[in-house]
Structure formats: structure tokens, C-alpha cells
Image (cartoon, helix red, strand yellow):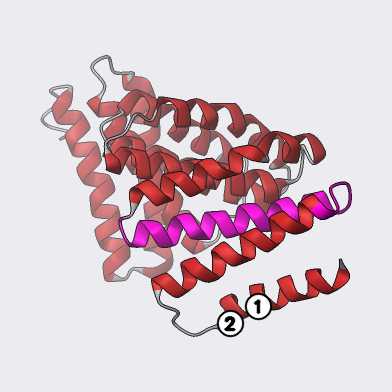
Amino acid sequence: SHKNANNYKAQVNSIINKNNPTIEEAIGELSRIRTIAEMLLLRSWNTFKTDKYRYIFMSTLNLIKWNLCKKDFSHAIEHSEHVNLYIDDALEKSPDDFNTISVICDIFYHQLYAKLEAGESFNETLNKIHQYVPFLLVAADKKKYKLNTALILGQIADVLLYKGITDESCHFYAKVLNIISDIEDIDVVEKREFAIFVGHYNVALLKKPVKDYSLIEKNLDIEESLYGQLHNAFGDVRSKMDLAIAYSHKGGYYEEIHDYKKA
């Protein structure tokens, strides 16, 4: 009903605007918000479904994040699996709604992280990420969406690399590079973020037993170029250290191929 919807919005605003909620308070409020959204969905199944799904997914994503703050991986995984009830219908209803698809992919990224940290099998989660990322790429048809998509894929790649799943991490880093190569104007914060991803991609490529040296050289040049642009723009300590990291990656690469003079 309209009254319930207003009550729901009021509860959403209360949790958003509350200063410094405790973890337990946040989890409790978000659980109630999700329950209300699910009740609204069931009561009026065929109206405004996209909005209701988005509320359910967003509250679930934040529940997962708060549980990860507690290092409560089992509940983080439990919350992430809860939305399996809704994903297929949500995508059928709005197959090109970027906000909904990006939240779904973000949920699976956090589920992957939680399962890796908990030492649980992650193959099913990784398969779901592979299943839903194509929806994300199709929906990312505007500049701001492309940037958000690259950040989500970069996060997935980073956690895989961190856990030593190198080949899979390279798969997602490559998608990040494909996206950002199509964007002409990237702001400073995003440029630094993407330079970090490129650097991590280079680390991953150098860890592979069979190396594509031409790809590594190309990516090393991209990393140096991005950090060089930031250094030319700012010249501060951070930009100098970032550029030094790019040079260290290049040095490591030339040492790898026994070109010690360049190293």
C-alpha cells in the first residue's frame, strides 16, 4: 500500500541519516528494511517490481558489508544467497537496468570475497559472476556506467589475485582495460584507481607460468602512462611513489626476461 511504501522510505532515510550507527543497529535496521520490501513485493507482485527488487538488493548488499565488517563470513554468505530468490525475475523484468544488475554483481563479488576468506568452495559463485557480468557489460552504455562497471570488475580481479587465483584474475583485469580504453575523459581519482588495476594485472601476468610478453610490455606502458599523467598533473609525494611503482614493475619484467641493462 501507499502508506507502507511511505513507512518503508522513512525507515530507509532513518538508517541513511543516522550518525554512526553500531554494526548491530545497522544490521537490525537493514534486515527490517529488506523484510518490508519483500512484503511490498508479495502484496503487489506486478507493480513497481524493479524498484522493490532494487530495495531488496541494496539492503542485502549493505547487510553483507556490515557482516563483513564483523568478519562474520557465514552470515554474509547467507545474506548473499538469499537474493537468489529474486535475481532471475529481476533480470527478466529489467534486463538492461544498470543499477539493478550492478548491485547483483556487487553482491556476488562480496559473496566471493566472503567464501574465499571463510575457506569455502567458491566455484559456484564464480560461475554466477561469469553468468551475470555479460548483462553488466551490455547495460554499461554510458560513460558513468562504464566506469562503475570497470570498478566492479577490478574489485573481482583484485580479490582473485589476492587469493592466488591468477588466471581468473587476468580474465577480469582484461575486461577492465577493454572498458577504460574506450573512455577518453577519466577524472583523477578514477585514473589512479585504474592505474592500480593495471599494475595488479601486470603482477598477475608475471605470475603466470606461460607468459604473454607482448601483452605485459603493452600493459606496463599503459601503467607508466597513467601514473605519468598523474605525476605531471600533481608532482606530489603520492604521485611520485605511484610512478616509482610503475617503474619497479617494469624493472621486474626486464629482470624476468634477463634484460638486466633495462632492468
Q: Which residue is mark 1?
A: 13
Q: How many marks?
A: 2
Identify the disc placed on residue 17.
2
Residue 196 part of the magenta-drawn span:
no
> Which residue is situated farthest in the top direction here?
210
In this rendering, would 208 be left or right of 101? left
In this rendering, would 214 be left or right of 21? left
Tell me what residue is drawn at x 17 percent, y 35 percent: 252
Crowding around mark 2 (Cα neighbors within 10 Å: few <14, some 14 to 19, many 20+) is: few
Figure check: 129 above or below 60: above
Residue 70 placed where, x, y %?
Answer: 32, 61
In this rendering, would 235 be left or right of 37? left
Q: Is residue 225 visible?
A: no
53 or 192: nearer the viewer: 53
Tell me what residue is drawn at x 56 percent, y 42 percent: 105
Name the quarter where the N terminus is drawn.
Answer: bottom right
